[in-house]
C-alpha cells in the first residue's frame, strides 16, 4: 500500500511542479485590447480576456508602464476598478485594495493576488497574450 502511494505521488509530480514553484502560465489566445494612443497615462480600460466571461482591467500607469489583471476580486469576485486618485485597484464591495504594480492585496479582506494578464505592445497596439496565476499566494 505504501509503495502504491509513492508510485501515485511520483506519477503526479510533473503535473504539480508548476504549482509547487509558484506562478504558472496559462496558454491563452492573443487578443487585441486597445491602441495605446487611446489610453492616456493614469487611465484604465476595461476589456474581457481570454473570453467574454472574464472581465479584466488594463492600467496605463503614470510612469508609462502597462499592467493588466483579471478584475474579479479574489475575496468574493466583485468587480475591481482602477482609482487614479489613489493609484490602486479597488474592490468597492468590502473595501479591498490591490497594488497595481504587483496585483497583491494591500488592504481589506482579499488574501490572494489578482491574476496578472501578460501584455505585448506591437506597432502601438496593446495585446493580451497570456495569464499568470499564483497558486496559494497569501498577503505578504
Image: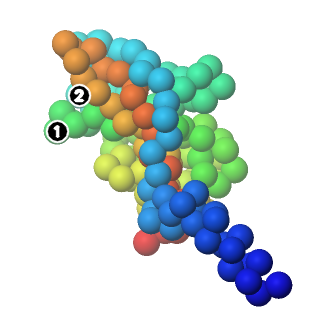
Question: How many C-alpha atoms fall within 10 Å of the one at disc 1: few (<14), some, or many (≥20)?
Answer: few
Q: Residue 140's image quarter?
A: bottom left
Q: Position of residue 81 (x, y in %)?
A: 49, 36
Work out which quarter of the rendered image holds the N terminus and state it: bottom right
Above or below, 91 relative to 10:
above
Left or right, 100 with reference to 81: left
- The answer to whether the residues at label 1 and label 2 have Cβ atoms under 8 Å apart is yes
Q: Secondary structure at mark 2?
A: loop
Q: Position of residue 45 (x, y in %)?
A: 41, 23
Asked if residue 3 shows in the view, the reply is yes
Residue at (37% x, 36% y) in the render = 118
Q: Residue furthest right?
A: 1
Residue at (42% x, 51% y) in the render = 103
Residue tagged 2: 41
Earlier residue among tags 1 and 2: 2
Q: Residue 78's image quarter?
A: top right
Residue at (49% x, 30% y) in the render = 28
Q: Residue furthest bottom?
A: 2
Pick the front one: 39 or 70: 70
Q: Which label number is shown at residue 21?
A: none
What is the count of numbered marks? Answer: 2
Question: How many C-alpha atoms fall within 10 Å of the one at disc 2: few (<14), some, or many (≥20)?
Answer: some
Asked if residue 105 shows in the view, the reply is no
Mark-to-mark CA distance, 1 and 2:
7 Å
Residue at (24% x, 23% y) in the render = 121
Pick the front one: 45 or 83: 45
Q: Secondary structure at mark 1?
A: loop
Left or right, 138 with reference to 120: right
Above or below, 67 relative to 33:
below
Above or below, 70 relative to 35:
below
Q: Which label number is shown at residue 63?
A: 1
Left or right, 33 with reference to 28: left
Amino acid at each position: 500500500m505504501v509503495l502504491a502511494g509513492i508510485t501515485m505521488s511520483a506519477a503526479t509530480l510533473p503535473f504539480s511542479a508548476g504549482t509547487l514553484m509558484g506562478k504558472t502560465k496559462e496558454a491563452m489566445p492573443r487578443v487585441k485590447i486597445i491602441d495605446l494612443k487611446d489610453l492616456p497615462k493614469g487611465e484604465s480600460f476595461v476589456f474581457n480576456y481570454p473570453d467574454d466571461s472574464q472581465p479584466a482591467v488594463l492600467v496605463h500607469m503614470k510612469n508609462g508602464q502597462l499592467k493588466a489583471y483579471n478584475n474579479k476580486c479574489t475575496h468574493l469576485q466583485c468587480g475591481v476598478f482602477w482609482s487614479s486618485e489613489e493609484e490602486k485597484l479597488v474592490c468597492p464591495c468590502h473595501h479591498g485594495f490591490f497594488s497595481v504594480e504587483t496585483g497583491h492585496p494591500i488592504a481589506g479582506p482579499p488574501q490572494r493576488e489578482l491574476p496578472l494578464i501578460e501584455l505585448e505592445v506591437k506597432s502601438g497596439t496593446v495585446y493580451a497574450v497570456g495569464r499568470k496565476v499564483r497558486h496559494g499566494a497569501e498577503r505578504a
